[in-house]
Amino acid sequence: MRRSIALAALSVLALGTAQASAQSVTFDFEDGTDQGFGTGFGNDASMNFPIDNIGGSLRMRVVNTNSFQEAGRESGANGSPFFLAMAAAAANEAGYVLSYDWYVDTTLTNNPGGFLQLGTYVNTGSGYYAQDFPAIKDVELNGTQLASGQVFSGTVSETFAAKGFDMPPNGGNPTPETFLRVGFIVNAGTDTNAVVHFDNITIAPVPEPASLALLALAVPALVVRRRGTPD
């Protein structure tokens, strides 16, 4: 398990206070819907992901189907908060963070001798595609962990640049991108029913120095809980 905000910390030094009004978007699923997520390369009508209440927080349930790119969120150039945040990230990958919370109850896996890996990807209407996998894995659980019957959870937070993404700047094209997409990779070998819950999926500017100390308190970490313990 690894996640570092070192690159984010370096980036923030060069940003200044203008970031306070920059574009951002968060999907927290508190309205009980999947808020526009679809299959890996589909639209928001291609899949309805269930929303589960776990420890008082509503989270999107994604089941591994061996599609690899299991869930994606896209938008056309319609001025939506998601499109504007993605366009801003494309123009400044070192200055924008992609973060999310993840939660895995290992009693829901069908192949405890296997593995579970998570990653992220981006895709644009002009044909650009990039993923931070397998060179970088946002999360990796081994067979011993999957057989433990425990709950594992954590937060992933990293700049688009640190993920290796280099999306075409939307504003630099003759016409805007027809769509922008971000999504999740779930790789679980033969366990086609491995379940991952996602929450607080956020695209936002790197925190300013005053906020960075607070972010440091939430450095991505692996949290192990026994079943039945509220999250």
Image (cartoon, helix red, strand yellow):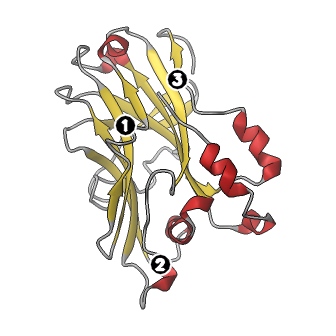
Image quarter of residue 186: top left
Confirm or deny contact between disc 3 and disc 2 (CB under 8 A).
Answer: no
Which residue position holds label 1? Answer: 118
Q: Amino acid at mark 3?
A: Leu
Q: Secondary structure at mark 1?
A: strand
Q: Earlier in the sequence, mark 2 or mark 1?
A: 1
Across and down, in percent, residue 6 comes to 63, 43
Residue at x 43% of width, y 55% of height: 164
Which residue position holds label 2? Answer: 170
Q: Nearer the viewer, residue 85 or 141?
A: 141
Q: Secondary structure at mark 2?
A: helix
Q: Amino acid at mark 1?
A: Leu
Q: Is residue 10 above or below residue 222?
A: below
Q: Is residue 83 above or below residue 214?
A: below
Residue at x 77% of width, y 69% of height: 18
Image check: 41 left or right of 93? left
Residue at x 63% of width, y 50% of height: 8
Q: Earlier in the sequence, mark 1 or mark 3?
A: 1
Confirm or deny contact between disc 1 and disc 3 (CB under 8 A).
Answer: no
Cα gap from disc 3 to disc 2, whole angstroms: 35 Å
Q: Is residue 164 above or below residue 91?
A: above
Judge the density around disc 1: few (<14), some (14-19), many (≥20) Cα neighbours within 10 Å: many
Image check: 143 left or right of 149? left
Cα gap from disc 1 to disc 3, whole angstroms: 13 Å
Cα gap from disc 2 to disc 1, whole angstroms: 27 Å
Which residue position holds label 3? Answer: 222
Q: Amino acid at mark 2?
A: Asn
Judge the density around disc 2: few (<14), some (14-19), many (≥20) Cα neighbours within 10 Å: many
Residue 201 makes an appearance in the image: no
Q: Secondary structure at mark 3?
A: loop
Across and down, in percent, residue 231 comes to 57, 21
